[in-house]
C-alpha cells in the first residue's frame, strides 16, 4: 500500500483526528503500557514528558504554558500501533552561551541595528532561558511580558502555544513511492518542538528553480538554539544545539533519539560513536572544474540542473533560469550579506551512492540507516542529524540536515506533514505530490487557476489555505510565495454574512 494523503497542520491550535477513527472505525483505545513490546516502551520513553505541568520560564499567553510534551500514549487504530503525542510546542531550553556563540552574536553584520543597544546584553557563560531578552530588536512581536521579545532577531515572529496532537506509527514501513518532505512541521522533536525540513520556501529571484537552504540563508534570522517561528510555530531546521545540551548528547557515543519524523522514523542526533558523526551521502556539485560532470562547463556558472539529483550519471540539463554564480553577493530577506557559493541552494547537492558504503557512519539518500539505537537490542532504521567537522575543528550543518529530501517511510493518513511537495525534488524532474492521483478534487474555478499559476495541485493549495477564512501568511510560507502574490491569484474574499 502506498500512503495517499497528507494532513496540513495549521499553526493555530488544532486537533488531528486520524481518518481511520471516523464513523464505523473501531474506537481508539489506550492500552496500558505494561504489555507493550520493548521497542515501543523505549520509543515512548524518548519523549521529554512534563509530568508536573512545569510552565515555560518566559513565554506565556493568557495563562502559563507548560513546556515540553504533555502526554504520550500508545494507541491502536485498526490494528496499527501509534504514539500519540500532545505538546505545547514551547521548549524548556536553558542554554549556556559559548564563547563562539557570544562572538557570533556580537559580530552580526547588522549588530548595531539588530540590537536595541547596538550589542547583545548577554555574553559567554551566561545561561539564557528560552525566550529571554538578550537585547535583540525583535520585530515579529511586541515588547510585552510573555512574548519573548528580545530573544529573536528582527524578522521572525515570537512563538505561540501550538497544542500539537500528533500520531507516529510505532513500526514504520519503508515507502514504495518516495514522498518528498514539504514546508511546515514534518515531525516533532522529543520536546514537542516542530521539525522543519531544509527549505524556507524562498528561491533565487523567486523563480522556483534554485531553492534556498534555510539553515544557511536564515542563519541571522535564528535564535541561539538555533530556531525561530513561522506564524508562531517554533521550529528547528538544523542541529538543535539547545536540545542536544538538554539531552546530554556530548558526542561520546551513539546519539539518543532527538525526535520523530512524520513517517514515525526516529531522528537521532549527529553521532554514531565516540567523536564520530554520521555522514551525509549528499555532496556539493563541482561548479569550479570545467570538466566536472556535476558542473555546467563554465567555472562558477549555474546554468544547468542535474537531470536527477539521485543519479548524477544522468548528467545535467540546461536551464534558462540560471542561478547566481558561485561568487555572487546575495542579500537575505533580513538584509544580511552572503556569497552564493556552491552548496547555497538545494539544487547544488547530489546523492553519491559510493558514500553509502555500509560503514557505521554511512547514510542513505533519505539521511538514515539501519543501525543500533541506544536502548534497543535490535538495529532499527533511523535518520541522523548531519554535521561535519570543518578544518578549524568546529562542526557545520550538512544537507539534508535530518530527513530527506524524501522520507524513508510510508506516510499514514494521519501523518504530520506540513504541506505536500510542490517542487521538483530531484533536479528538473517534476514529481506529483503524494496521493495526487487518488485525491484530486473536482476542478474548482478560480482556485484551480490559482493552483495552476502556483504550479501546485488544487489539493495542495486548499491544504495550504486551510479552512476559511484562510491564513494567507501561513499559506504563502507553505507555498513559498509572497502574501501579495498569493492574494493576487485568489478570488476576492466574500464579505462575511
Ligand atoms: Zn524556519
Ligand atoms: Zn545511527
Image (cartoon, rainbow, N blue to C red):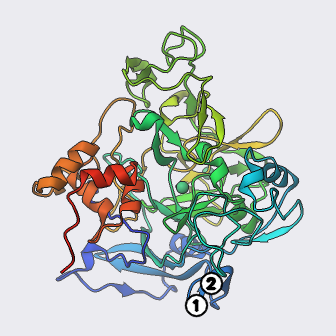
Residue 443 location in percent, x, y?
10, 54
Kindly identify which residue carries mark 2: 50
Residue 394 appears in the figure: yes
Work out whether 201 lies above or below 125. Answer: above
- Going from N to C along the chain, the mark reached first, 2 or 1, is 2
Point 46% across, 61% down: residue: 185
**Numbered tag placed on residue 33 in the rendering:** none
Question: Which quarter of the figure is the N terminus placed in?
Answer: bottom left
Point 88% across, 59% down: residue: 124
Q: Say what secondary structure mark 1 lies in.
A: loop
Residue 213 location in percent, x, y?
54, 42
Give the crowd class for mark 2: few <14, some 14-19, many >=20 residues within 10 Å.
some
Point 62% across, 90% down: residue: 53
**Numbered tag placed on residue 63 in the rendering:** 1
Residue 150 is left or right of residue 376, and the answer is right
Residue 192 location in percent, x, y?
56, 72
Residue 417 appears in the figure: no
Q: Nearer the viewer, residue 386 or 354?
A: 386
Residue 336 location in percent, x, y?
65, 43
| Label 2 CB sits under 8 Å from any ligand 1 atom | no
User: Which is in the foreground here, disc 2 or disc 1?
Assistant: 1
Work out whether 308 lies above or below 271. Answer: above
Amino acid at each position: 500500500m502506498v500512503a495517499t494523503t497528507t494532513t496540513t497542520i495549521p499553526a493555530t491550535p488544532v486537533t488531528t483526528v486520524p481518518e481511520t477513527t471516523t464513523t464505523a472505525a473501531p474506537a481508539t483505545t489506550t492500552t496500558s503500557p505494561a504489555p507493550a513490546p520493548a521497542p515501543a516502551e523505549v520509543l515512548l520513553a524518548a519523549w521529554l514528558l512534563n509530568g508536573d505541568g512545569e510552565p515555560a520560564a518566559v513565554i506565556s499567553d493568557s495563562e502559563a504554558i507548560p513546556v515540553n510534551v504533555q502526554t504520550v500514549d500508545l494507541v491502536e487504530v485498526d490494528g496499527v500501533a501509534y504514539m500519540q503525542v500532545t505538546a505545547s510546542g514551547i521548549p524548556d531550553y536553558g542554554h549556556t552561551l559559548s564563547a563562539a556563540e557570544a562572538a557570533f552574536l556580537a559580530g552580526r553584520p547588522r549588530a548595531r541595528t539588530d540590537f536595541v543597544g547596538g550589542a547583545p546584553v548577554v555574553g559567554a557563560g551566561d545561561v539564557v532561558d528560552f525566550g529571554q531578552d538578550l537585547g535583540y530588536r525583535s520585530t515579529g512581536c511586541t515588547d510585552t511580558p510573555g512574548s519573548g521579545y528580545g530573544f529573536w532577531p528582527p524578522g521572525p515572529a515570537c512563538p505561540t502555544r501550538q497544542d500539537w496532537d500528533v500520531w507516529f506509527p510505532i513500526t514504520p514501513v519503508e515507502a514504495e513511492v518516495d514522498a518528498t518532505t514539504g514546508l511546515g512541521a514534518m515531525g516533532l522533536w522529543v520536546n514537542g518542538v516542530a521539525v522543519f525540513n531544509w527549505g524556507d520556501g524562498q528561491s533565487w529571484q523567486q523563480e522556483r528553480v534554485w531553492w534556498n537552504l534555510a539553515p544557511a540563508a536564515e542563519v541571522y534570522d535564528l535564535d541561539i538554539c538555533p530556531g525561530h517561528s513561522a506564524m508562531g510555530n517554533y521550529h528547528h531546521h538544523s542541529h538543535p544545539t539547545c536540545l542536544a545540551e538538554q539531552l546530554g548528547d556530548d558526542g561520546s557515543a551513539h546519539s539518543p533519539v532527538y525526535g520523530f519524523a512524520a513517517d514515525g522514523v526516529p531522528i537521532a542526533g549527529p553521532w554514531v560513536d565516540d567523536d564520530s558523526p554520521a555522514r551525509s551521502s549528499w555532496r556539493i556539485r563541482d561548479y569550479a572544474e570545467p570538466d566536472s560532470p556535476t558542473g555546467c562547463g563554465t567555472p562558477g556558472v549555474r546554468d544547468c540542473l542535474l537531470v536527477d539529483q539521485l543519479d548524477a550519471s544522468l548528467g545535467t540539463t540546461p536551464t534558462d533560469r540560471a542561478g547566481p554564480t558561485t561568487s555572487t553577493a546575495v542579500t537575505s530577506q533580513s538584509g544580511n550579506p552572503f556569497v552564493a557559493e556552491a552548496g547555497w541552494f538545494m539544487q547544488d547537492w547530489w546523492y553519491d551512492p559510493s558514500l553509502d558504503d555500509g560503514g557505521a557512519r554511512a547514510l542513505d539518500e533519505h539521511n538514515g540507516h539501519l543501525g543500533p539505537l541506544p536502548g534497543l537490542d535490535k538495529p532499527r532504521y533511523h535518520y541522523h542529524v548531519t554535521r561535519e567537522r570543518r578544518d578549524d575543528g568546529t562542526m557545520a550543518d550538512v544537507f539534508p540536515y535530518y530527513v530527506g529530501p524524501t522520507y524513508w517511510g510510508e506516510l499514514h493518513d494521519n501523518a504530520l506533514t506540513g504541506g505536500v511537495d510542490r517542487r521538483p525534488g530531484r533536479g528538473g524532474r517534476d514529481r506529483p505530490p503524494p496521493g495526487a492521483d487518488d485525491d484530486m478534487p473536482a476542478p474548482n474555478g478560480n482556485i484551480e487557476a490559482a493552483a495552476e499559476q502556483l504550479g501546485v495541485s488544487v489539493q495542495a493549495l486548499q491544504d495550504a489555505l486551510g479552512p476559511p477564512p484562510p491564513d494567507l501568511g501561513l499559506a504563502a510560507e507553505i507555498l513559498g510565495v509572497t502574501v501579495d502574490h498569493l492574494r493576487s491569484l485568489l478570488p476576492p474574499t466574500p464579505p462575511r454574512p
